[in-house]
Image (cartoon, rainbow, N blue to C red):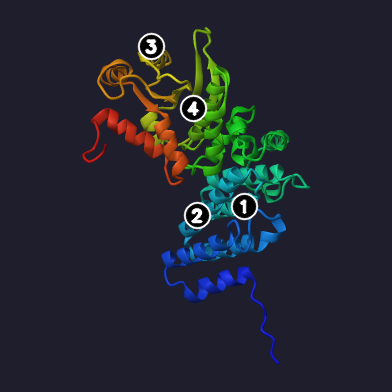
Amino acid sequence: MMVTATVSFPEEVVKLLEQHATTPLDAYERARKLLMDNCKVGGRFDPLKPVGEWKPVRDGYHKAHFWFKAKGWYFASEKLLTEWWNTLGQLQFEKNKRIYRAECAFLLSDLYAAMNEHGLALRWAMLMQADDILGGHPDGGGAGKQSLTTIKGLSVPALDELNKISRSCLAKAKKEGWNKPVAFAEEVLCRFVQGKAGYEFVRTYSSKEFPLSQGYFNALYKQINTSKGALDKGNTLEDLALYLLTLLPGCIPHKNVLSKQKLFETDVLVQNLSAESNVVADLLGRHFLIECKNRKKKSNSADIGYFLYRMKLTHTRFGIFFSKNGITGEKGNEAAHELIYRAYHEDDLICILISDEDLKKFEQDQELNFWWMLLEKIEHLRFGKSKGKG
């Protein structure tokens, strides 16, 4: 009697793609359904179980990625892997349980290297290394540790700093919980940007905006809404603002920058240090300012006026005012709202408001793009709303 060999899950993925996929879109949709159906809570390879028990689905993603890569269907793999990264991060946030994501970051790093997007390949390799350490990797890192300095170009001191921050976040995550910002690899990179090796982050430059991580964003957003005390409330909104700004091409944000004469303090100063000209630098300038107000009352004309004054003092023409509860006069032409319009028309200063209403959109939609949100708000300020928009 002939015994039929059991087909492994990774082989099942390859068989599906080779025998049934007829177009790039068809291949993507078939692979996505098979992988996501098996990589879900209660699924065949539940990611809440020990890592070894859902290794087959990780190997399945490997097979799918390299199959797409061999055909040059890079963006199919990008969509597949980015969704997997976000799904696992959101699951960690919701279940307050450590979820391994380093392998996904490894595949994304490999993908962007193949696409000659070396900046994105470096950033994903840094996320891979951070996630490995957050997972208590016995050797202090795997592929990230091996490739960051020798292949990706990160300096040895920068890697040491990345590892130090990762270990600090791991210690805090064990105490505070796995649904807190410190438990995510993205937090490691946000802290790295502010550290002594932060300028190495410029190496992660790409003309593309980096995708928002749903689980990490939601951890930051929850922190805003649960923080107590004026100082903590302000700091948590600054943390979220800083994260969104690291997604912009070439941008390096710094928190709490004090002027030389100590006349005022800037919540977040953003520098665009990309070596090449790009649309972000051309439109926003090489430096711009960020103000964050996380309080119950709306920000008023005095708050906006002072921010605009600081923009003039520092010769910056673009600024973002994060105010959780908005500003006065938003529905009419008066107070703080009117000041923003006058500053643009009279002084060519562009001040964009980001309120809680905007932040909730990111909480609900992982496809939302921060750069496009800024562009839409700039367009509205300069030209008014398009027909059909509310």
Q: What is the number of the mark on residue 271? A: 4
Left/right of residue 7 with respect to residue 260 in the rendered view: right
Instruction: Kindly indicate whether the residue at mark 1 contacts the one at mark 4 (C-beta within 8 angstroms).
Output: no
Query: Callout 1, which amino acid?
Result: Phe
Q: Earlier in the sequence, mark 3 or mark 2?
A: 2
Question: How far from the left and from the top, in percent, is residue 37?
Answer: 54, 62
List the single residue furthest toward the bottom: 1
Query: Callout 3, which amino acid?
Result: Ala
At x 64%, y 43%, the residue is 96
The Cα–Cα distance between marks 3 and 2, rounded to whole angstroms, is 45 Å
Does the rendering let one see residue 277?
Answer: yes
List the single residue furthest toward the right: 138
Secondary structure at numbered mark 4? strand
Left/right of residue 41 with respect to residue 176 in the rendered view: left
- Toward the viewer: 119 or 239? 239
The Cα–Cα distance between marks 3 and 4, rounded to whole angstroms, is 26 Å
At x 58%, y 48%, the residue is 91
Quarter of the rendering containing residue 181: top right
Q: Earlier in the sequence, mark 4 or mark 1?
A: 1
The Cα–Cα distance between marks 3 and 1, rounded to whole angstroms, is 48 Å
Residue on which disc 2 sits:
78
The Cα–Cα distance between marks 2 and 1, rounded to whole angstroms, is 12 Å
Instruction: Kindly indicate whether the residue at mark 2 contacts the one at mark 3 (C-beta within 8 angstroms).
Output: no
Q: What is the number of the mark on residue 338? A: none
Left/right of residue 131 with respect to residue 215 in the rendered view: right
Q: What is the number of the mark on residue 106? A: 1
Secondary structure at numbered mark 2? helix
Residue on which disc 3 sits:
302
